[in-house]
Image (tube, coloured by chain):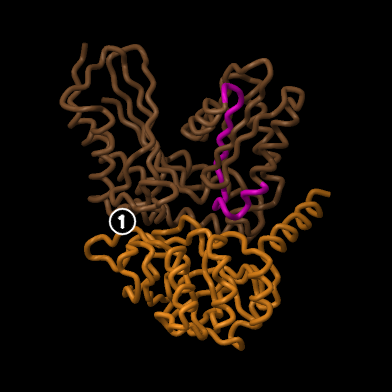
Amino acid sequence: MDIKLNTPLTKESIKNLKPGDNVHLTGTIYAARDAAHKKMMELLDKNEELPFDIKGAVIYYVGPSPTKEGEVIGSSGPTTSLRMDAYTPRLLDLGLLGMIGKGRRNDEVKAKIREHGAVYFAAIGGAGALIKKTILSQETVAYEELGPEAIRKLVVKDFPVTVIIDAKGDDLYEIGREEYLNWKHAEDK
Amino acid sequence: MRNIDSKDVTLAVKALVMDANYFLPEDVLSALKENKKKEKWLLATNTLGMIIENAQIAERDMVPMCQDTGMVVVFVEIGQEVHVENGLLEDAINQGIREGYEEGYLRKSVVSDPLNRKNTGDNTPGVIHYTLVAGDQLKIMVAPKGFGSENMSRLKMLKPSEGLQGVKDFILETVELAGPNACPPMVVGVGIGGTFDKCTLLAKQALMRKLDQYNENPFYRDLEIEMLDKINSLGIGPQGFGGQTTALKVSIEYFPTHIAGLPIAVNINCHATRHKEVVL
């Protein structure tokens, strides 16, 4: 059963999510990956404002392929999240509540997710064409010169994601596999 | 002697890089569908369904199936009777990549220096491997390689005494370490033997093989089947969410090696196993 969620997220709206939940996200999310995260840290170091309101925001780790004529955006599947791990705890401290990417997060990020009651979603890696169809519009909000690595504001409708790390810090990459193997061993008997 | 105009090479490579990014090979799509039928874990079945749907959308709309349109690996088999005219073969291939990535709305993901990291702006250069063969044909295979999976690939110089068990353990360990980060279900290319460099090339060549083909040597064929089974008992599943389908295929290539060595390389590919070829 798919859960429908709107952005910006609130701690209330995400506190009951569990690893493995399929969620359809609607609203504004912000595309940012390696270079943009590094630039955001530089802004914070200088006590400057971030290019968007971080409170309740959802960041999507993506570098889309170029936009074909007549389309909104290019293929937009997730990039590997762990490269953003170094930057994420600080953003979570400032009110970031959701992240979409793929792959494992480190222990510090997990601890921060637990501390702030945030959530980490996975989008299907390699499903760039499918995901692209759920993006209704895009607008570059910062660092245009970074090309695919610019910060973009994306308006999405029913963007399909799966809960990986919930507000309690439980991780689908551990739990999902364990549950499957337990079921399989029981089946095989 | 047969003359081939380098402009024809450019045209061919341009079409190949676009096709490779839009159209998932038939055998890969079949393997995804077959595995979805066999998968009994619901989240895994649904995830495979979305991957299949994605391939169908990419084909229909002629858009890249994944936004990581990769760094282009090219395998060229040049017949010894072939004479390339009107420019260097390497330049012609890179020009094809340049034009294909621009006109095909493919992402430019190559930096000119691994430490200074300035984007080259045109996805060149490709990584090109040339083999001279008998005959008068020029065969070109392009394989855009995404780095989510490439980054999880590994090489080890085993001791010969570690033997077959060492090989099996290394393959499984590499898949385990890759886990969700390589966008399972994976295709696993293994190179065994040769030298340090030959070994990794073997692994990449293994990834070019069709998924319904096995190594001709029955010993290695059995090993391919056994390792796929062992990998799919790990429970990592599609996208690492849990399930049976962690890998679609394990392909192994081997080569003679030194009496003191047992090199092994595991090159991981994700489910977007992209390659297209043409014979000029």
Disc 1 residue type (three-letter): Asp
- B100 to the left or right of A151: left
Which image quarter holds the C terminus of chain B?
top left
- A155 to the left or right of A10: left
A23 and B135: which is toward the camera: B135
Task: Name which residue lies at 30% across and 59% down.
Answer: A66
Q: Quadrant of residue B93 in the image? A: top left
Chain B pictured colour: brown
Crowdedness of circle 1 by 10 Å Cα count: few (<14), some, many (20+)? few
Coordinates of residue B186 in the picture (x, y in percent) = 56, 45
B165 and B32: which is toward the camera: B165
Chain letter, colour orange: A
Which residue is farthest right? A189
Would residue B153 be counted in the magenta stretch?
no
Which residue is farthest left? B86
Q: What kind of element bears circle 1?
A: helix
Coordinates of residue B260 in the picture (x, y in percent) = 68, 18
- A155 to the left or right of A185: left
Residue B261, above or below B12 = above
Magenta highlight range: B176-195
Coordinates of residue B225 in the picture (x, y in percent) = 65, 32
